[in-house]
Image (cartoon, rainbow, N blue to C red):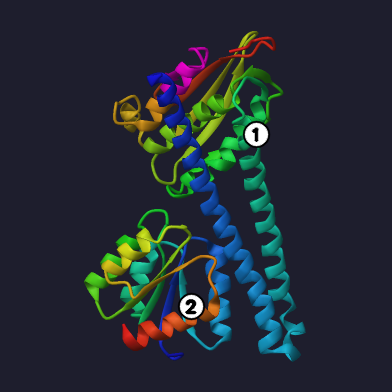
Amino acid sequence: MKDKKILLVDDETEFVSTLAERLKLRGFNVETATDGEAAIQMTEESRPVLIILDLKMPGLGGLEVLKQVKGGDSSIKVILLTGHGSTKEGIEGMNLGASDYLMKPINIEELIAKMQDAIDNG
Amino acid sequence: MIMKNEAIETESAFLGCIIAGATHELNNVLAVIQESAGLVEDLLLFSPQTALSSGEAISNSLDSINSQIQRGVGLLTQLNRLAHCSDGGKQEIDLGTALEGMTVLCQRFAKMKNVEILPLEAAPDLKLTTRPLVLQMAIFSAIRACLDVVDTDGRIRMELTKTDNWVDICFLIEDNSPDSRMSFGSDTSPHWKALLFSAGQLQGTVKPALSNSGIMLQLPICLDSTF
């Protein structure tokens, strides 16, 4: 899994850069974006196998990004991140093709397990 | 009785909205702290012998933790102040503190549109005796009504004009679409309606007005005013 490209998307700049650094320390090939528009552009350019995607972002929100990504290439796996206590939007995202969702703050080992599962099993 | 129920529902909706926005922000604060602390831990765990050479990364993480703690404390302070406002009756309230508090608590909503809310350049030293929760609701509704129509990447600036007995708080919209203000007073703007409702609850002494630049709230400021 570690040679595969992963895109991490969240508008919380410090969160996205720090989590990316932690994944890189574990050997993952990670790129980052801090808004939905940039995420779409980077997906088209660098074709990640997996996107870790925040649901609530200014401009293009996570669900809209998910729809566009899946519309362009349904093989790209998506794991959603949400800060909400509710699971409603996470489930809505899974109905739109996301592999899984996680509540922030996240446990990195749980995230990696979900990443592995998404890539192996979709 | 109907008016009382409507007031409770409107106040509950206002508090729910504030709490949802602030707790979402607090969740983000905790997420950044967790990842920053986790990165320090990782640097020590994965390469303990080179951890000292990662001094800059560790220092940046600690700076990040400290700044996020300040962000969290700011949010919690304003939430706590608001909680003490909801005790019911009339209390003395500092207008500058109320405006500063609502600016902080509205940041989440502004951020979702990439809009900047600029606080007052100098906080006024003005005390009012009023129902603080309803006054805060009026300020919140005015800011949200402005956020409804401001362009993405625009700004909302607060300006205060004082006369002998009145103070005008102006929420000025700075963007490239002055025509969009036409939708301000429409029936479809829930925040404008909430603002009118709060003004009604304050017995009409808070007078909201619309202009091409934004929204103005006019309040009496004499110290013995008990609206």
Instruction: Give me the chain letter of mark 1.
Output: B
- Write the residue at 43% across / 18% down: B209
Q: Is residue B191 magenta?
A: no
Separation of disc 2 and disc 1 at Cα?
39 Å
Q: Quadrant of the N terminus of chain B?
A: top left
Instruction: Name which residue type carries label 2.
Output: Leu
Which residue occupies the foreground of this view, B2 or B46? B2
Establish if B136 lies above or below B71.
Answer: above
Whole-percent x and y of residue B31? Answer: 57, 64
Find residue A4 and report its image quarter.
bottom left
- Judge the density around disc 2: few (<14), some (14-19), many (≥20) Cα neighbours within 10 Å: some
Which numbered mark, 2 or 1, is in the foreground of this view?
Answer: 1
Q: Which residue is mark 1?
A: B84
Q: Which chain hosts label 2?
A: A
Q: Is there any visible trace of residue A65 in the rendered image? A: no
> Which mark identifies residue A95?
none
Residue designated by label 2: A111
- Residue B183 location in percent, x, y? 31, 29
Residue B203 makes an appearance in the image = yes
Do discs 2 and 1 share a chain?
A: no
Q: Amino acid at mark 1?
A: His
Q: Are marks 2 and 1 in contact (CB under 8 Å)?
A: no
User: Quadrant location of the C terminus of chain B?
Assistant: top right
- In front of the other: B61 or B139: B139
- State the residue in front, B162 or B74: B74
Badge 1 marks a residue whose secondary structure is helix
Which region shows up in magenta? B195-210
Residue B174 image position (x, y, % from top left):
46, 35
In the rendered view, would you say B225 is above or below B106?
Answer: above
The extreme right residue here reads B52
Q: Is residue A69 left or right of residue B151?
A: left
Location of residue A116 by image quarter = bottom left
